[in-house]
Amino acid sequence: MEDLVIRDADVVDGTGADSYRADVVIDGGRIVSIVKEAAAAGCQRPRAVRELDAEGLVLSPGFIDMHAHSDLALLRDPDHSAKAAQGVTLEVLGQDGLSYAPVDDRTLAAVRQAVAGWNGPGDDIDFDWRSVGEYLDRLDRGIAVNAAYLVPQGTVRALAVGWEDRPATPQETARMRQLVAEGLEQGAVGLSSGLTYTPGMYAEDAELTGLCRVVARYGGYYCPHHRSYGAGALEAYAEMVELARKADCPLHLAHATMNFGVNEGRAPELLALLDEALDAGADITLDTYPYTPGCTTLAALLPSWAGEGGPREVLRRLAHDGTAERIRHDLEVTGADGCHGVPVDWDTVEISGVTNPALGDFVGRTVRQSASLRGEAPWATARRLLLEDALGPTILQHVGHEENVRAIMRHRVHTGGSDGVLQGARPHPRAYGTFPHYLGRYVRELGILSLEECVAHLTGRPAARLRLPDRGLVREGHRADLVLFDPRTVAAGATYDAPRTLPTGIPYVLVDGRFVIEDGRRTDVLAGRAVRRSPV
């Protein structure tokens, strides 16, 4: 007998087609049979070792988080309910051009400090890998959900060039292309960039185009956090579209938002730009999270010149009064490139986490609020936090616009990505709530998307971008990465005040045919593995 039959489920299969009632049979980690209600009439229904009554529940493919920051969390926290409880069965790591492979000892130390606000300092992790392949092998020891990986361009540049703001030499360029090729050969699905983060932002377009040509040769895709989401947002999007065209490389735009006051109501301009490129034959997708605030590190707001040389040089510059004043002027008057060319509004910058427990009183307040309590200027507070927490603070930046969020999520190439930073005492609720928030808020309550459309955005469409031939759909022969949810009650529990609250209405989640969520509770199953790039 087969392992499991899920009876009388309302199947939403990930294609966008209408739902249907069926019994779905699972064996050996795969869907082996789908018996639709009409086909079952008058014949014997399938039997299995275990039978699950899914009356009133929707059965869909597991959700694919196209932009995740669980690079260390998957190793640190076997439970990983932050994602498993949402119905996520696959995360894409290595985002924004900064992660932990490929590295050497020197680069690893600097990267760990640079992104401590995203992933923690990592003192509890045994970094027993250096290459992309070794990192994927580490994931293969058993994780809560599956994970794919993007080669991080900033990490590659740090390894081949360093943290200097200068063009790469021909030898360094060749080395970067070799590192990207090796990462793809070892199983990465593409290349990411963080073009408002050092050192990736120091790369010129010609350098990035050369790397993207390597990515295209291996059948991967380019995923840039581009050079501005603020004052130069549309120009930055256009730059990435043109770069990908020149490289003949598929493009996936990370957290494709239009933020800050200068972009209020301008989502249609972005979508028109993308439609023009798509109609001309471009291969473009994008992801968004269904919230208005952004989330990053406080250090990310600094001007690029302040980051040259790496984290130690940033701290040295912050400690020097004269240099710190230059940084303040760029932030508050000019509009630093790290802050997307917009002068920082300290009322919008909320501290969401610190790595130094002694600084915990700053969490949950904006920089201006904390500065007022201390009787000092906001920059003095921000500078103090950066120095005393060694660049560790994480922030929420309240700069988004709901009308832009809704317009972009309707687009024909949209997918879902949490951009979920799990670090800090008060992380962004998107880390724990993105996928049920789409289903509860934007499908059931607002009707922005139909249920079938939304599920396709979160499953079949991202699986196609990742070139995964046997995931993302409820289809015979496909992997049994599945979620069962109640469309009447599914909702994000996470809020800004209680961001680690788990969702409701998702009683069952399966990874490789095994229950990681059962009766609404996390099991001890670690069925997740690294999902490697499919050969061209």
Image (cartoon, rainbow, N blue to C red):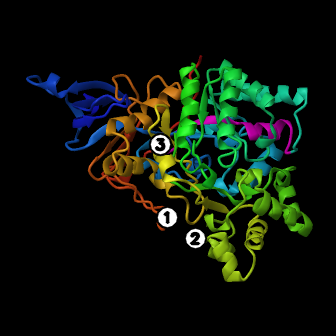
Q: Amino acid at mark 1?
A: Tyr
SS label for mark 1: loop
Horizontal side of 288 relative to 228 (left or right) equals left
Percent position of residue 213, x then y? 72, 22
- Looking at the picture, tell me which residue is in the foreground, 313 or 521: 313
Above-or-below relation of 27 to 515: above
Residue 141 spot, x, y in % from top left: 56, 40
Residue at mark 2 to residue at mark 3: CA–CA distance: 29 Å
Residue 425 horizontal/vertical position (percent) = 57, 66
Question: In this rendering, which labeled residue sits more in front, label 2 or label 3?
Answer: 3
How many residues crowd mark 2 within 10 Å: few (<14), some (14–19), many (20+)? many
Q: Which residue is mark 1?
A: 496
> From the viewer's perspective, is 185 left or right of 19?
right
Residue extent of the magenta highlight: 140-163
- The residue that mark 3 highlights is 407
Q: Amino acid at mark 2?
A: Gly
State the quadrant of the C terminus: top right
Q: CA distance from mark 1 to mark 2?
A: 9 Å
The image's mark for residue 364 is 2
Q: Can you give x and y, in whole percent of width and height, for residue 423 in the image? A: 60, 58
Question: What element does badge 2 sit on?
Answer: loop
Rendered image quadrant of residue 321: bottom right
Which residue occupies 63% across, 68% down?
347
Q: CA distance from mark 3 to mark 1?
A: 23 Å
- Relative to residue 49, is residue 491 depicted above or below? below
Q: Amino acid at mark 3?
A: Ala
Label located before the other in sequence (1 or 2): 2
Q: How many callouts does the rendering have? A: 3
- Is the residue marked by circle 3 packed among few (<14), some (14-19), or many (20+) residues within 10 Å? some
Mark 3 or 1, closer to the camera: 3
Horizontally, residue 384 falls left or right of residue 349, namely right
Looking at the figure, which quarter contains the N terminus? top left
